[in-house]
Image: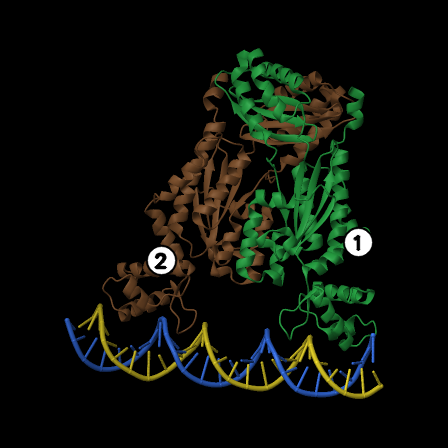
Chain colours: A green, B brown, C blue, D yellow
Amino acid sequence: MGMDERKFRILQAIIDDYILTAEPVGSRTISRKYGMGLSSATIRNEMSDLEELGYLDQPHVSAGRIPSAKAYRLYVDTLLQKGQIPSEDEVSIRRHFQGRARQMEEVMDQAAQVLSHVTQYMAVVLPPTGNSPRLQTIQLVKVSSRSALVVIVTDGGIVRDQVITYQDPIDEDTLYAISRALTEQLHGCSMEEACGKMPDLMQRLHENGEVLEGLSQYFTSRRDGNHRSHVAVGGASNMLTYPEYSDMEKARNFLSLVETRERLASIISQHGNVSLTVRIGPETGIPEMEDCSIVTATYATQSGRHGTIGVIGPTRMQYSRVLAALGAMGQQLTDLFGVTENEEENQQKER
Amino acid sequence: MGMDERKFRILQAIIDDYILTAEPVGSRTISRKYGMGLSSATIRNEMSDLEELGYLDQPHVSAGRIPSAKAYRLYVDTLLQKGQIPSEDEVSIRRHFQGRARQMEEVMDQAAQVLSHVTQYMAVVLPPTGNSPRLQTIQLVKVSSRSALVVIVTDGGIVRDQVITYQDPIDEDTLYAISRALTEQLHGCSMEEACGKMPDLMQRLHENGEVLEGLSQYFTSRRDGNHRSHVAVGGASNMLTYPEYSDMEKARNFLSLVETRERLASIISQHGNVSLTVRIGPETGIPEMEDCSIVTATYATQSGRHGTIGVIGPTRMQYSRVLAALGAMGQQLTDLFGVTENEEENQQKER
DNA sequence: GTTAGCACTCTCGAAAGGCGAGTGCTAATC
DNA sequence: GATTAGCACTCGCCTTTCGAGAGTGCTAAC
């Protein structure tokens, strides 16, 4: 007994129906709604086979069948083979980003919002990370006579800023001079390298030791790449719509997980640099998400940095739609950050 | 029939018990657990009176009584009269912020986290707003030859930065010169005033019209004070713990409201500049929160700007504990932003 | 190989009934 | 006059029961 064409079509019908209704599917339903001119009895036999093959589960004897994780896997794999399905959602995604190019975090938030709205599941957007960013410009901005704001521009955009304070007042011109010196010395360095160079610099600019001290701490704190600035989440409450989470305890655990952004980010970013991944139910390896699937896509900024976007929904999610939406959104973000941040031509001119 | 001492104590006992159990309280329970040497029959009579006075509700004839919003109001008012109750939570709050002074948003997030953890309700932290911030320093940081990052420092700390782009390349020294000129001209201005001054400036520095154009747009976008940078939320999932939200539909609506941060922020920030407010159930005026109470406190940074912190929980929340925690956290944040940002001495020296 | 028919299983929802918590009233007591 | 014991009564909730309905597996016929 193997998996023939007919079995496959029946399985597909079952999955489609289950995605729609979240109820176990019976042989009669398939026979009528998805026809193929077969009687329920025949379907029944096939379903029995499919169960034995591990594609279907039966909650109890007198209920219909439910697709297993294995079934979804097959379903998604064939979906992926066929190539991306274009969709009308793509248009609505495009429309949301027309015009104003905003700040990165705003875009991320908006992307999560749109994605969750389009799919009706939960969406997560992570900022670009990867090959540790190279310093490009360092600038100290005077806040008061005894404190300054450190602004660091990396090749991949802006790293967050931070206030440093010191005892001896420093005026603007001096700050500017320090900034120039620092930029000159540290241009093109990674955070680690910058850490290494700091002692040397502190000797050279010893009269401003205090400033450099603060800066040094800052580099150290950012060195470990795991500092994720912002995690945008949208539509978490959508998950409560689905019967999968009608159990309060489950829902609570899930939302509690979503609230710890670091953990969520690490879950979402676990794709082996594959641009489009689908993890189904147990494949996620996360107890709170045993009834969930996670679909991720990546977007690129210039300089090879990649961000991740993901959709989390019940295992019976509308994969084709989610895949399409994620693809479209990934493209959209790539375009967006390409335009906003892309300065390759200019940089080449400069050299 | 009036509200005498004994009635009040009985009412208090009922509220205390209901806060603990979320179950209607019967006369027998009060008689036994909260003694006072009265029999259940006497309590019963008093409860009947209290119901007539509008302090108690009865879900149905053969159930115990439930405190009404009016009862909570009385309860909270006397709590407030007695003055702040010190608590052991204060210590745990203090401990969380020892050492490292971090970036504002991090502190906010952390505050929301701690607050929700201590109270077991949901916590919200809003950044300081108020008397529209005055520009202090404007600095353009080179990102590439054709784009720069605008960093604006206001008297109240840091305003977000934004990238502007332009056609003609500008080098660092020119950017610095522009920055100096802008700072000189716009120091002490509000966003609106800055908007007004821009046309004039654009004439004077006409060769850099493009940069100023971008800047002008930026000012305009920030002019309307409703631009709230960040809303920190913690413990939203805690709300699912309480039987008040065992109804999925309610829970969903609530969480959906929480997800739209603007709306949440506007709800939390609706305190008439009173440093400590309690809104109980219907007093909130928000349908999704009819079973909730909102407690807010404010914290101050220098220059008279105020931020808001709030806790949202079921109407039967542990008010005394929440009030204490909020008070402690408000103080903590005031101290923190006082130390980090407070430069009053220095500023006075400068003048 | 496919299908009709049938007995069987098991869940779900409604109805029924008992339990228990709590009340209000009355009459006795302090 | 306030307090309390006693008692009848109410009503939500829990459990049980039971029938309906959906679905299956098997067998025998096509």
- Could you say whether the residue bearing mark 1 is in a helix, strand or loop? helix
Instruction: State the residue at coordinates (51%, 56%).
Output: B240
Chain bearing mark 2: B
Residue A56 lies left or right of residue B167; in this view the side is left
How many other residues sit within 10 Å of disc 2, few (<14), some (14-19) or many (≥20)?
some
| Disc 1 and disc 2 in contact, CB within 8 angstroms | no
Given residues B337 and B92, the one toward you in this image is B92
- Could you say whether the residue bearing mark 2 is in a helix, strand or loop? helix
In the picture of the structure, the residue carrying the numbered disc 1 is A88
Given residues A106 and A303, the one toward you in this image is A303
Q: Position of residue A77 (x, y in %)?
A: 76, 54
Residue B298 lies left or right of residue B170; in this view the side is left
Q: Tell me whether marks 1 and 2 sit on the same chain.
A: no
Q: Position of residue B300 (x, y in %)?
A: 46, 35
Q: Name the quadrant of the N terminus of chain B.
A: bottom left
Reply above or below: B198 against A91. above
Query: Residue B224, labelled with which disc?
Result: none
Residue A86 in view: no
Q: Give the Cα distance between marks 1 and 2.
A: 55 Å
Q: Nearer the viewer, mark 1 or mark 2?
A: 1
Chain bearing mark 1: A
Please state which amino acid type lies under the numbered disc 2: Asp
Query: Residue B16, labelled with which disc?
Result: 2
Q: Position of residue A344 (x, y in %)?
A: 78, 28
The count of marks equals 2
Instruction: State the residue at coordinates (71%, 34%).
Output: A305
Q: Position of residue A241 (x, y in %)?
A: 62, 60
Please state which amino acid type lies under the numbered disc 1: Glu
Reply above or below: B141 against A322. above
Residue B122 in view: yes
Instruction: State the residue at coordinates (55%, 22%).
Output: A216
